[in-house]
Image (cartoon, rainbow, N blue to C red):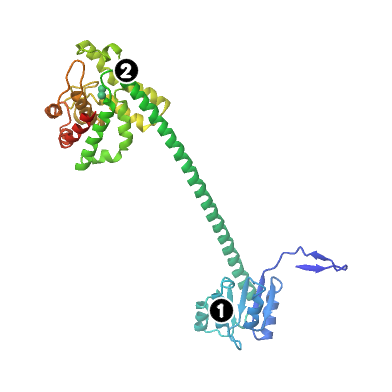
Amino acid sequence: MLNENVNNSPVVNKEKVKSMVMIVDDNIANLQVAKNSLSESYDVFTVPSAEKMFDLLKRNKPEIILLDIDMPKMNGHEAIKVLKSNPDSCDIPVIFLTAMSSPEDELIGLSLGAIDYISKPFMPQLLLKRVDLHLLVQNQKKLLEMQTKKLEAQGKELLHFNNNLQNMVEEKSNDVLKLQRAILKTVANLVENRDCFTGGHIERTQRGLKLLIDGLNNIGLYREQLFEWDIDLMLDSSQLHDVGKIAISDVILNKPTKLTDEEFKLMKQHADLGVKIIEEMEREIPNSNFLKHAKIFAGTHHEKWDGTGYPRGIPGEEIPLPGRLLAIADVYDALVSKRPYKQPFSHEDAVKIIKNGKGTHFDPVLVDVFEQVAEQFKLFSQSE
Ligand SMILES: [Fe+2]
Ligand SMILES: [Fe+2]
């Protein structure tokens, strides 16, 4: 609001800007009474008709409209319908200020979208209180809407930031995982290469293990355990099952004849040694699922169902399922592979030997699964 000083130069009036109230009534006396009641607190616009109100609304947007109903030409009911159907004015609160004071009239007025209904004649103080109250509520509502919008915008920003961060973390985690797998595959290859006779053993046992897991899945056995596994991770981690051989002497690993009892005893240590090596790795990479599975494979692939295996001699389902599965894939490959001290067994003989070990060396249920997928073992073992 601007005042003018003696030099006709405008100065800013530092008074608080008042909220604008528009009063629409064809009765000039009523307009004057209403204006007198409110002008101390509000910037009041008095308007003699609905048509004039729409003219003024093109340039001004009041905080509230007090609207008479009974007016010539456009009445208050028609006027509020137009107000509420226009996006520019639909949010301006309207109070009917009228002599039509029956409950039915009031109901119609409120149904058309008015926020209140004040009967004429009114007490000036009461009119002021009602307008104060409605504007307070409207201001609170606007504030709340603004805060909600602000919060929504902040929420969206946060979500966007979070998604980006998540993508970055996922990318980095994948890189780390790939690197981890590449290093561990290299370690597995190094171990395998120390032993001149078992080339390709790790890859073939991995493929055999996959056949057995697929077979289990097909018949729905051990479903709960399989559901928890990341199969690719499991298969990769099986590569370390003989990592303990890294600590076994070359003389034993590469002995061209059958091992003596004493040498075999030393060779058997590779299961425990494997566990220890993987535990060392876990100190550097804690909480790695890959290493957790690898440790189970290393420590249990030579256990037997009847408890006569090594290193711990645990029986039956005390042997973790990955170890029981790998035992079959591992023994099958050892049987059909050539060693300096033995000729390879035929596929049929290897299957027969594994079947004979049902319930003694191997989990009987897993031998049944093996039988179902044995032909596929034959395919890749012969192609090597
Ligand atoms: Fe082994
Ligand atoms: Fe092995």
Please name the residue that numbered disc 1 is placed on: 82
Classify mark 1: helix, strand or loop: helix
Q: Where the C terminus falls, by quadrant?
A: top left
Select label 2 or label 1 by which is in front: 2
Residue 329 location, x and y as percent?
22, 29
Amino acid type, label 1: Val
Of residues 61 and 291, the one nearer the viewer is 291
Q: Residues within 10 Å of mark 1 (few under 14, many from 20)?
A: few
The quarter of the displayed image where residue 67 is located: bottom right
Amino acid type, label 2: Arg
Q: Quadrant of ligand 2?
A: top left
Q: Identify the residue at horizontal 18%, vertical 34% (top origin).
A: 366
Residue 364 against residue 54 in the figure, above or below:
above
**Residue lying furthest front:** 383
Residue 371 against residue 312 in the figure, above or below:
below
Please name the residue that numbered disc 2 is placed on: 194
Q: Where the N terminus falls, by quadrant?
A: bottom right
